């Protein structure tokens, strides 16, 4: 199992796109999460993204990371669900865990409706 | 003729009883007042954050000073954390307070406040999100107020039933 702690990469996660400044959702997704996810899938392992320990999130960061992961189609949707878990242990970060899951589900539903 | 100790004893017992009742009432009032104050404070924080967020979404980023917008963005993320911390404190203060659909309402508020084009450079103003923030805040406020009313009514009923229970004769075994 690979654990990715967002706090190891950014104390204060930024905005949605790379052009909006450092530690954006796009940057985290493309430079850190996707490579780890693909490598873990090859090894038949899980990836856990830990959300705790940062100075708060903008919801747009989470949407770009997790909704964007589904949108970009880097893996089959069922594989994302199988390999990736989002986790927050602290009370402060629990809503962000639920938001991340909600963004993934919403994007899956949106794409299913388009097919 | 009553023995001489009866009058002082009854007087003393009445005084003790009255003190206990007064203590119970004061304790109940203290708990309800404290809970109401905590919910007031949380609602004020939610309203203030929603107003700030609405002002943020009504800024056309393409024509504004980026420094002011950055300030609003950091404030909004901070206010999200404050709201969550206050909800956590409320949960500790009264574990039996039930706010219906609390998680759903908080997620709706967080998404409306800082989702979409939040922190996206050159974003246009977002009227839909400005309205959604206010609606989400109103729903969360309403749910908190309803929860407070239910909780206080629950206390009133429990206190009344408990008083009634004390007045009723105790059942002896079968």
Image (cartoon, coloured by chain):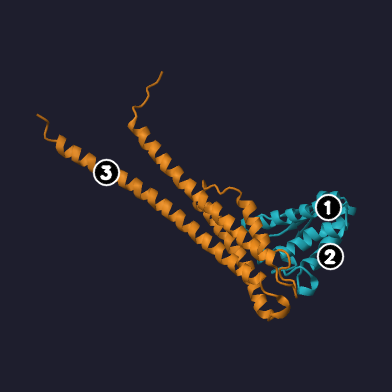
Chain colours: A cyan, B orange
Residue at far bottom of view: B65
Q: How many marks?
A: 3
Label drawn at residue B92? none
Give the position of the C terminus of chain B as an image quadrant. top left
Cα–Cα gap, marks 3 and 1: 66 Å
Q: Nearer the viewer, residue B90 or B70?
A: B70
Q: The disc numbered 1 marks a residue on which chain?
A: A
Residue at image coords 58%, 61%: B83
Taking the image as shown, residue B130 lies to the left or right of residue B19, namely: right
Residue A46 visible in the current orientation: no
Rendered location of residue A18, percent (x, y) = 80, 72
Task: Using the image, determine if residue A42 lies above or below residue A14.
Answer: above
| Contact, mark 3 vs mark 1 (Cβ under 8 Å) | no
Q: Secondary structure at mark 3?
A: helix
Asked if residue B44 can be seen in this view, the reply is: yes
Mark 2, secondary structure of its residue: helix
Q: Position of residue B105 (x, y in %)?
A: 62, 54
* Residue at 23% from the left image edge and 43% from the top image edge: B15
Q: Mark 2 to mark 3: distance in Å? A: 71 Å
How would you rate the neighbour count of disc 3 (Cα within 10 Å): few for under 14, some for 14-19, many for 20 or more?
few
Quadrant containing the N terminus of chain B is top left
Q: Which residue is mark 2?
A: A30
**Residue occupied by mark 1:** A80
Residue A99, percent across and down? Answer: 70, 56
- Mark 1: which secondary structure? helix
Task: Choose the circle earlier in sequence order: 2 or 1.
Answer: 2
Q: Residues within 10 Å of mark 2 (few under 14, many from 20)?
A: some
Residue B115 found in image quarter: bottom right
């Amino acid at each position: 199992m690979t654990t990715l702690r967002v706090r190891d990469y950014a104390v204060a996660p930024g905005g949605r796109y790379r052009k909006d400044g450092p530690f954006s959702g796009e940057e985290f997704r493309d430079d850190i999460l996707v490579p780890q996810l693909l490598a873990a899938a090859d090894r038949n392992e899980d990836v856990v993204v830990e959300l705790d320990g940062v100075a708060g999130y903008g919801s747009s960061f989470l949407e770009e990371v997790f909704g964007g992961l589904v949108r970009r189609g880097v893996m089959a949707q069922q594989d994302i669900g199988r390999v990736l878990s989002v986790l927050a242990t602290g009370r402060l970060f629990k809503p962000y865990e639920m938001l991340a899951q909600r963004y993934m589900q919403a994007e899956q539903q949106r794409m299913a409706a388009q097919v | 003729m009553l023995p001489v100790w009866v009058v002082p004893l009854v007087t003393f017992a009445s005084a003790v009883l009255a003190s206990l009742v007064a203590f119970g009432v004061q304790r109940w009032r203290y708990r309800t007042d404290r809970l109401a104050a905590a919910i007031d404070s949380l609602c004020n924080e939610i309203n203030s954050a929603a107003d700030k967020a609405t002002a943020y979404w009504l800024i056309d980023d393409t024509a504004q000073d980026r420094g002011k917008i950055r300030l609003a963005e950091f404030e909004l993320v901070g206010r999200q954390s404050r709201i969550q911390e206050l909800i956590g404190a409320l949960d500790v203060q009264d574990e039996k307070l039930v706010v219906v659909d609390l998680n759903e309402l908080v997620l709706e508020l967080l998404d409306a406040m800082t989702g979409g084009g939040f922190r996206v450079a050159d974003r246009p103003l977002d009227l839909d999100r400005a309205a959604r923030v206010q609606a989400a805040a109103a729903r969360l406020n309403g749910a908190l107020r309803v929860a407070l009313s239910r909780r206080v009514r629950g206390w009133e009923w429990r206190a009344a039933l408990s008083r009634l229970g004390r007045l009723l004769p105790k059942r002896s075994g079968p």
